[in-house]
Amino acid sequence: MIIPVRCFSCGKPIGHLWEEYKERIAKGENSKKIMDDFGLERPCCRAVFIGQTDLIELVGKFKKS
């Protein structure tokens, strides 16, 4: 799944935050602190980030050429 441009429930733009979120998680920061820094207060927006699984590379292996 690719991160949506806007939150499914409230419509807040969140897509531009995904790359920085991934980088900061890789560095070992706490996900709650990162989302607080981004200003994501609603549980619907937070759920999009917490529930996101990056499968693009895995799915790309099965693409017919």
Image (cartoon, rainbow, N blue to C red):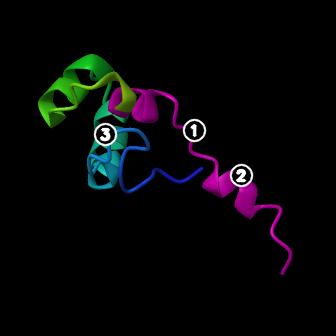
Magenta range is 45-65
Horizontal placement of 12 versus 50: left or right?
Answer: left
Q: Earlier in the sequence, mark 3 or mark 2?
A: 3
Q: Whole-Å distance between the Cαs marked 2 and 1?
A: 11 Å
The residue labelled by disc 2 is 58
Q: Residue at x 77, y 61 (%)?
A: 61
**What kind of element bears circle 1?**
loop
Q: Earlier in the sequence, mark 2 or mark 1?
A: 1
**Residue 31 x, y percent position in the rendering:** 31, 22
**Residue 35 x, y percent position in the rendering:** 24, 28
Residue 30 seen from this side: no
Q: Is 49 in front, or is 20?
A: 49
- Which amino acid type corresponds to the residue marked 1 in the rendered image? Thr
Q: Is 14 in front, or is 34?
A: 14
Which of discs 2 and 1 lies nearer the camera? The answer is 1
Residue projecting furthest to the bottom: 65
Q: Residue at x 35, y 47 (%)?
A: 18
Q: Whole-Å distance between the Cαs marked 1 and 3?
A: 13 Å
Residue 31 seen from this side: yes
Classify the position of the C terminus by image quarter.
bottom right
The residue labelled by disc 3 is 21
- Which amino acid type corresponds to the residue marked 3 in the rendered image? Tyr
**Residue 57 x, y percent position in the rendering:** 64, 56
Count how many numbered circles sit on residues in the image: 3
The reply to whether dot 1 and dot 3 touch (C-beta < 8 Å) is no
**What kind of element bears circle 3?**
helix
Horizontal placement of 61 versus 3: left or right?
Answer: right
Q: Residue at x 45, y 27 (%)?
A: 50
Horizontal placement of 63 versus 17: left or right?
Answer: right
**Mark number displayed over residue 53:** 1
- Which amino acid type corresponds to the residue marked 2 in the rendered image? Leu
**What kind of element bears circle 2?**
helix
